[in-house]
Amino acid sequence: MDFWQMGLDSDKQGMEFAASSKPLKPPSNISDIVSKFAKVCKFRSIGVFNASENADQGHVYPMISGDNACLLDEESGEDVLFHAKKIYPTHAEVQKSGNVCAHVEITQLFDTLLALKIAYVKLQEAHIPYDLQKVRVADEEVMFQLETLGKIKKAYKEKLLKEANSISACSALFLAEVQVKERALEKLKSQAKNKGKKVANLRKQLQELEMKNKKLSEEIEEREREKFAGLNHYSLESVVKAVGIAIHDFAKPLIALMKHSDWDLDQAANAIQSSVAYAKRSHKKFAFEAYITRRMFHGFLQQPCFLGNIMKLDDPIVALMEDPQSSFARFCRRKYMLVVHPRMEESFFGNLDHRNFVANGIHPYTPFYRAFVRMARCVWYLQALIAYIEPEAEIFGVKQGVEFSDVYMEVVDELKEYKTMDNERERYRVEFMVMPGFKLMGTLIRSQVYVSKGGFSNVRR
């Protein structure tokens, strides 16, 4: 029910009361009615009601100036004088008869509510068109009527206390309330004690679970170590070759997207590795493979990790969706940020959605990202394998410009097929390294390099 309808109902009740010939008993809920109306009116106007300028129906009310327009509650406004020009019976007269007191207070309540309704309508009308002076005047009038309601409420509560006419009655009421509060306090203490026991029990369970998880982690690591215990130099060499194939497979869609996005591949290859003498223009793809390799092996950590069923899955992204916060997921997130430059991704797809998703721990189920994850899985597996093999394998690489040595290096297969190195007496210069090499128990897995004829330096890393 809106404020306007409340005013109409108040008017109707006032007329019904005037027509009644029987005296009414003093209502015990007047204080509650006043309190509810005071709370309802704790707002400023939003919108406009239509009302006429002469809607005050002859009632005249003085204004409250400045910042004195505040709401009165049960304990407020004790020293504020009653400023209304409409004359009502004094508080002493109200106490003469219970019925007369109730009649006067109800009349005061209805008149004040009507005046409050009229003042609120004026406050609404002052907003359209907006008139600051009228708004202030109307606002002060509304506050005055609210203050009057507070006085009526206070007077009625004082009457009730005086009618009790007994200190013992007030003390009994106070003691009863104290007893209720004490019972509530005891109940809360009991609940807090039970909660404390539950917290202690849960903390104990948490410690037990942490101990079990630690034990399980140790068992899993030991099983992984036993799984790799039988691996040797040949096993490591096959994994390294699988990594090279995976990087080559990922470079294909990467280069295809660069072509589709109108990249200058010659300029891009030169930016990756400058001053390279390629035997064939198509060999520039090895520069992109070398770019991917450098970033995938950057910060290569030889640390044990739980492989689970990741290597058994046809599509490893399924493992990322099942556990997006695993060590493999963190590895993919870190390496994707290194391999795929933001400008590169934006030119491919017109946005940075892949990067934003991966940065927030979400792994998109797209062909491009799935191709990356398949390649990342091989590198991640190689990292775990090297950590588990005893003694540990060492990774090494070669710099551009050094002389080719078939002891530490091997050329990429396409150079062999292109017959670049038919002359065994010819000396060749390393242009760049495509895959690093590994040393294990005195044996070597040679690094893959791209070479050309020309000057060289004997610098090896």
Image (cartoon, rainbow, N blue to C red):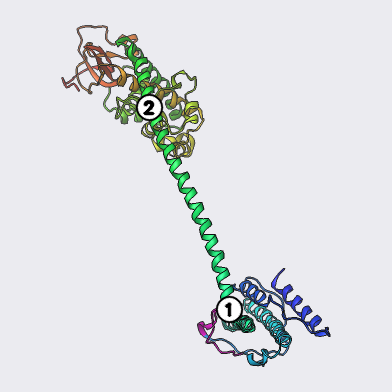
Q: Is residue 67 magenta?
A: yes
Crowding around mark 1 (Cα neighbors within 10 Å: few <14, some 14 to 19, many 20+) is: few
Residue picked out by circle 2: 215
The percent coordinates of residue 198 (x first, y second) are: 48, 44
Crowding around mark 2 (Cα neighbors within 10 Å: few <14, some 14 to 19, many 20+) is: few
Q: Which residues are magenta?
A: 66-83
Q: Quadrant of the C terminus?
A: top left
279 or 360, which lies in front? 360
Q: Quadrant of the N terminus?
A: bottom right
Residue 139 position (above or below residue 289): below
Real-space Cα separation, disc 2 to disc 1, in angstroms:
70 Å
- Check whether the beta carbons of the residues at disc 2 and disc 1 lie within 8 A of each other: no
214 or 192, which lies in front? 192
The percent coordinates of residue 12 (x first, y second) are: 79, 78
Task: From the image, state whether disc 2 or disc 1 is nearer to you.
Answer: 1
User: Which residue is pictured at 50% across the width and 53% down the height?
Assistant: 190
388 or 348, which lies in front? 388
Disc 2 is placed on an element classified as helix
Give the mark nearest the N terminus, 2 or 1: 1
Amino acid marked by disc 1: Ser
Q: Is residue 328 magenta?
A: no
Residue picked out by circle 1: 168
Q: Is residue 50 visible?
A: yes
Q: Is residue 307 left or right of residue 451?
A: right
Amino acid marked by disc 2: Lys
